[in-house]
Image: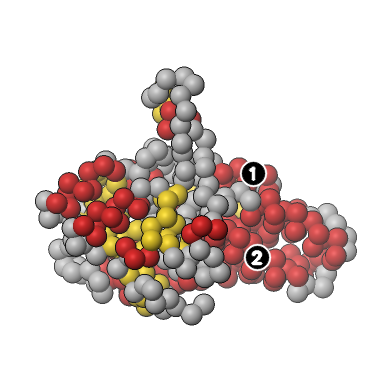
Amino acid sequence: MSNCQPRSIWWDDGLWLIDQTLLPEELLALKICSIHQLVQAIKSLKVRGAPALGAAGAYGIALAARLCRAAGSPEMMAELETAAEMIRSARPTAVNLSWGVDRAMRAAACGESGEEIRERALSEAEEIATEDIRVNQLLGKFGARLLRDGDNVLTHCNAGRLACVGWGTALGVVRSAVAEGKKIHVYACETRPLHQGSRLTAWELTEDGIPVTLICDSMSGSLMRKGKIDKVIVGADRITRDAVFNKIGTYSHAVLARHHNIPFYVAAPLSTFDPRHEESEIVVEERDPEEICSLNGKRLAPEGIEAYNPAFDATPLELVSGIITEKGVFKPPLMPLI
C-alpha cells in the first residue's frame, strides 16, 4: 500500500474531481468548468466528505477567479463573494466547505490585481489540498496507536481518501495501522440510503488489500453483542462544543458501542471543529426523500408516501471515547485549542 495514492480532487489547468456517484462500477475523472457545475457536484455528492469539501470550496474560489471577467480588484472580489456564497450554501452542515471557501477568499483579498488575485486563490487552494494529505497522515499515526494487531474495526459511511484529498481520516487510521504491520479487519456498514459504505468504503479497502466485510447498517449491535467488534472509528462533518455531526446512523452505533463497552472514536482534522456553536444551533441538511423511496429508478415505497431524509445526526460528546486529530487524541470534554 503506497502513501502516493490518487487524489480525489485536484487542479490541472482547471478543476478535476473523481465522480463518486459512479463508483464502484466506474472510476471517472470529471472536469468542473463552472461554479454552477461545482455546486451541483457538491449537492449530488459527486464530491463529498468534510476534508474533500474544504478543498472543493477553495478550488471553487480559484475557478471563480479564473472565470471572472471583472477588470478591477474591487469588482473582481465582489464577483468572488457571489460565487463564495453559492458554494457555501451547497451543503450547510459540513463546516469544512465554508472553511475552505473563506481561506481562499482571504488569500485572494490580498491580491492587488486580477492576476495576483487568481494566483493567490489557486496557491491557497493547492496548499489546502497538500495540507489535507499531510494532516491525515499525522492523524493516522496517532490513531494507529489505538489499534491492536488483529482488531476488528467497525466504520460507518466513508471517511477514507475519497472523503478527503487523500489518505483519509477514519480509514486513514486503519491504513496507518496496516502500514505499521498490524493486521486489521474492517466491518463496513452499507450506509443507507446512498450506500457510501458499500460503494466507497468497501471499494477503497478492497483496492488497498485491507480485509473488509460489508454489513447492513442494522447489524452492528448484533455483531457487538457477539464480541466481533473491538473498536468503532468514524469521521465527522462538524464537531461542535457538545456533539459530533456525521452521517445519519452514527449516533445509533455510538449508543450501541457504549452499551457493549466498545471504544467509539471520531477521526477528524482540526478544520472540522466548530467551537463557536452547539448542536442546537446547527442546520442539519435534509435531502430529497426520493433517495429513500427509490433505488436506481425502482420504487421502494408507495407513491406519495411521506419520508424523512436527514443527511446527518448528532452524537453527544459524552458517547465519544476520543477524537483523533493531527495534534493527538483528545478525550471529551477536553478539546484542542484551535
- Classify residue 83 as left or right of residue 172: right
User: Mark 1 belongs to which amino acid?
Assistant: Gln
Q: Quadrant of residue 23?
A: top left
- Crowding around mark 2 (Cα neighbors within 10 Å: few <14, some 14 to 19, many 20+) is some
Identify which residue, 28 or 68, lies in the foreground.
68
Q: Which residue is at 26% across, 68% downward?
A: 177
Residue 145's spot in the image, x, y percent? 26, 74
What amino acid type should be assigned to the residue bearing mark 2? Answer: Asp
Residue 271: tell me if it is visible: no
- Secondary structure beneath dot 2 equals helix
Relative image position of residue 255 (x, y in whole percent): 28, 55
| Residue at image location 51% in from the left, 50% down from the top | 284
Q: Earlier in the sequence, mark 2 or mark 1?
A: 1
Q: Which of 192 and 124 lies nearest the eye of the viewer?
A: 192
Q: Residue at 24% of width from left, 57% of height from top?
A: 257
Tell me the residue at 60%/63% (across/down): 100
Nearer-the-camera pick, 88 or 252: 252
Q: Residue furthest left?
A: 226
Within 10 Å of the Cα at label 1, are there few (<14), some (14-19), or many (20+) other Cα atoms?
Answer: few
Residue found at the very far front of the displayed protein = 280
What number is the disc on residue 37? Answer: 1
Question: What residue is disc 2 on?
Answer: 102
Quarter of the rendering occupied by the N terminus = bottom left
- Residue 138: image location, x then y, percent: 39, 74
Viewer-nearest residue: 29 or 95: 95
